[in-house]
Amino acid sequence: MRKLFSTLLILIFFLGNVAVSQQMDDYRQIEVTRWLDPTTRPETHQEYLSARSFDQKFDSKLTYSSELLGKNMCIIVNADLYPQISDSLSVFLFDLESEGYNVNLYTALNDGDEEALRNLLISEWNTRSIEGLIMIGDLALAWYELKEPASWGGAYVEFPIDLYYMDLDGDWIDSDSDGKYDDHTGSLHADIWVGRLLAHTLTYWGADEVTLLNNYLGKNHRYRKGSLRLEDKALAYLDDDWCYSGWEVALQMAYPTTHAVTDVNETNNTDYGNRLKELTNNRYESLLVTVHSTPSDHWFYGAGGVGLFYNYWIEQLGMQVLFYNLYACSNCRHTTSDCMGGWYIFQSNYGLLAVGTTKTGSMLHFYYYYDHLGGGSTFGEAFKAWAIQYMETGAGEDSRAWFYGNLILGDPTLKISRFADPVINGDVNDDSKTDVVDVVYLTNYLFKSGPEPPHLAIYGDINCDGEVTVADIVSLTNYLFKLGPPPCPS
């Protein structure tokens, strides 16, 4: 009876904290994220257009189609980029198919016509009921403009918007024909999830798009196969304006082990880096950070004033986090060179996904998003569910100002590690287990003209020496019957 009573007290305490967290999501009581740097400002749509060139036509091509029954999705890759990352993409496609995705892969050029790209998605959605889209490389962007609330200063702002590709049956209106949408009517809910892998705007450390994307896809594969892991815990780092928000309680809905830094005397740029850098080895899988920012830096308030944490420190320090929620003004404005959201996911050793915004505002109602992640949803599914529930109404008449810039940078098909189901080498016949049947299957293939194992190069290379030979049969036999080392992660 005493144990039951204690459990009830813990449950009541937790639910009470959730209620406080939800109450603090009243947007009228919450400080909006701000672009604090007086020496810079967001680039305009016209400046974005003037700074680049476009291809002459959209010219999309269906390059690969899975022959599976599963969850339908699309990948669209810049056509010029595709040949340079095709090997990494092949592994990525296999990983997706192994997890039940039926993928149509398109290549396309960026002619600046976002409507043509959206029409392709509408066709896929109408004919295949796709669940989501991953865009890789330089592809068309949609821009939106609105007047921010008077309490924010009432400025007109313009920004990239990926909701345009998420809501496929709504009406997007450009009333003054200036190339920026200024209204959204009809059916307003998100229909699919969308994620971007966009690296051509990252320049530090001699970075180039091809190397960054191939490295990202390598990290992605290692995570799916279980060899890239941090710990099943999270950090909520809430700077001064949000230190009493209680949002760390929402994060606990996905990560019961959540550490929170909320003391105004603790949160500063140096402490932030020290807690997350690789040398400290705190190994947080996820981070929620709330801080005034620009695309290039975080502005932490501390006892000594404002301290900046810069975009180029991310790679220098080796920020040891895989999944980011950036409640940080314009931190994912990917049209700005070296935006932090980009560097958080494209750094060398860590980083796979960032939720953030291309403008002021950010996510609210965190508990809804993290509740879905904690229930086993992918990041894309959780973000889509959150968008359906709150994108239009979560901050009353100010909802579009708060939320329309929100998007995902990274691969939305990922799940937090507790729900990832890595498959290691050794499952030669692809029946979801490793046993003597796999030894026989591989032996028959190599020496008796038996059928080629599915995905031979990945699951048949037991010792990861780059080829499939009798040495792999020996390795697998030793593992199963002689206490030898397990097959290496593929």
Image: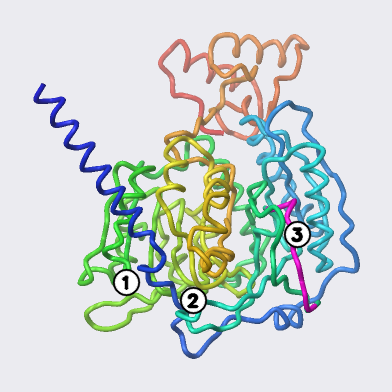
Magenta region, main secondary structure? loop
Is there CB contact under 8 Å for labels 2 and 3? no
Q: For the residue marked with disc 3, what is the amino acid?
A: Asp
| Label 3 element class | strand
In-front residue for pair 133/211? 133
Q: Kindly identify which residue carries mark 1.
A: 241
Q: Identify the residue at image location x=75%, y=47%.
A: 86
Residue 238 appears left or right of 45: left
Q: For the residue marked with disc 1, what is the amino acid?
A: Asp
Residue 90, how many percent across, how many down?
71, 40
In the rendered view, would you say 201 is above or below 321? below
Mark 1 to mark 2 CA distance (whole Å): 16 Å
Residue 212, how many percent across, how many down?
61, 59
| Label 2 element class | loop
Q: Kindly identify which residue carries mark 3.
A: 171
In the rendered view, would you say 228 is above or below 329? above
Q: Nearer the viewer, mark 1 or mark 2?
A: 1
Tell me if mark 1 has few (under 14), some (14-19) or many (20+) residues whose alpha carbon lies within 10 angstroms of its own.
Answer: some
Is 463 magenta? The answer is no
Residues shaded magenta? 167-176
Q: Identify the residue at image location x=43%, y=46%.
A: 370
Q: Pick whichever of labels 1 and 2 is earlier in the sequence.
A: 1
Q: For the residue marked with disc 2, what is the amino acid?
A: Thr
Q: Kindly identify which residue carries mark 2.
A: 294
Mark 2 to mark 3 CA distance (whole Å): 31 Å
Tell me if mark 2 has few (under 14), some (14-19) or many (20+) residues whose alpha carbon lies within 10 angstroms of its own.
Answer: many
In-front residue for pair 123/39? 123
In-front residue for pair 376/27? 27
